[in-house]
Image (spheres, rainbow, N blue to C red):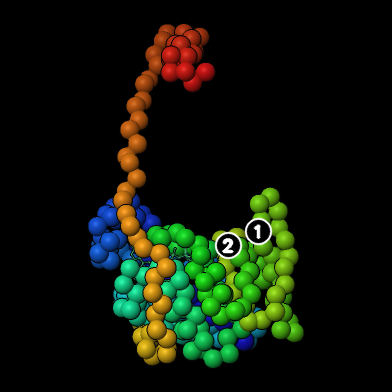
Amino acid sequence: MKIVVLIKQTPDTAELPKVAAEEVKSGTIKATMVINPWDEFAAEEAIQLAERFNGDAIALSVGAPGAVDALKHAVAMGVGSAALVDNASLRDGDIWATAALLAAAVKAQGAVDLVLTGKQSVDDNSGTVFVGVAGKLHWPLLTNVIKVREIADGVVTVERLVEGGQETVSAPLPAVISVAKEINEPRYPSFMGIRKANKASIPTLSAGDLGVVTPANKTQWTNIRKPEVRRTQVNIIGGATVQEKAAKLVDALLAEKVI
Ligand SMILES: Cc1cc2nc3c(=O)[nH]c(=O)nc-3n(C[C@H](O)[C@H](O)[C@H](O)COP(=O)(O)OP(=O)(O)OC[C@H]3O[C@@H](n4cnc5c(N)ncnc54)[C@H](O)[C@@H]3O)c2cc1C
């Protein structure tokens, strides 16, 4: 069985608030870049499924040359091999163009049975790339998956998390699956894994190598800005007794028309 896992490189979440709108516009983000945290769950699941069904796991990313480090993280975790798709043809790339490149890269791997993805990226946050990939491949899509129950006779059966419940769904292979964080506990790369990843050869493919023309964007980024900073004020309500403090608090809430 061949399993592809899609890995995006994103800024470290601790540094996301520091990323300026200009950096996003120019594509030169200065923050520390890491594997998208949601994609660690997808990588872990790919490793476990490859072990369970005696298969191969391959990590793919569309990104700048530095995105190879996110792929190395997946290899250090235990994913067998990886390839980077150069995003040079994706100036101001949108979801559709990204999905087109990823789908072409999946096809280039041969007879793939499953594509695993995270539920969203922590930077652009659209949670839609897997929809585009499944659409481009014409494969069924199973989202928000918390357990792969069984893969047998060309059918995958999963449990999905839905609002207030769970459901069990089956789809014919090949299929695309986006995973939720409840699916597993991603492992830390081992020392041996890190050494293996550092020695691994990770090819970089261009759109031309994949035999595709990157589609024109369907969406344009017209305005990227930080949200307004919220100004808040803290009043410490004093008083000799709890009753006095409570009475002052009620007066203050009435004055502000909160109650
Ligand atoms: C102003 C602006 C300019 C941009 N310019 C460029 C640009 O020039 N070039 C460019 O490449 N991007 C560019 N992007 C980013 C690009 O549009 C998005 O990263 C892309 O559409 C993916 O959307 P998302 O991050 O919301 O992914 P989501 O849909 O939230 O991701 C869901 C899952 O899909 C998979 N996935 C998503 N993206 C990738 C990926 N790149 N590789 C592998 N797996 C992935 C992961 O498994 C992820 O967990 C730009 C974004 C903005 C805001």
133 above or below 201? above
Q: Residue at 58%, 62% (x, y): give it.
A: 180
Q: Secondary structure at mark 2?
A: loop
Q: Which mark is residue 25?
A: none
Amino acid beneath label 1: Leu
Q: Residues within 10 Å of mark 1 (few under 14, many from 20)?
A: some
Q: Residue at 62%, 71% (x, y): give it.
A: 141
* Count of marks overlaid on the render: 2
Q: Quadrant of ligand 1?
A: bottom left
Q: Residue at 25%, 64% (x, y): give it.
A: 26
Q: Quadrant of residue 33?
A: bottom left
185 above or below 251? below
Amino acid beneath label 2: Ala
Q: Residue at 58%, 86% (x, y): give it.
A: 112
Q: Which residue is the site of mark 2?
A: 180
Callout 1 touching callout 2 (CB < 8 Å) = yes
Q: Quadrant of residue 68?
A: bottom left
Q: Which residue is the site of mark 1?
A: 161
CA gap, disc 1 and disc 2: 8 Å
Q: Secondary structure at mark 1?
A: strand
Image coordinates for residue 226, horizontal then vertical, percent: 32, 48
- The quarter of the image holding the N terminus is bottom right
Q: Residues within 10 Å of mark 2 (few under 14, many from 20)?
A: many
Q: Earlier in the sequence, mark 1 or mark 2?
A: 1
Image coordinates for residue 232, horizontal then vertical, percent: 35, 30
Residue 15 visible in the snapshot: no
Image coordinates for residue 5, horizontal then vertical, percent: 51, 76
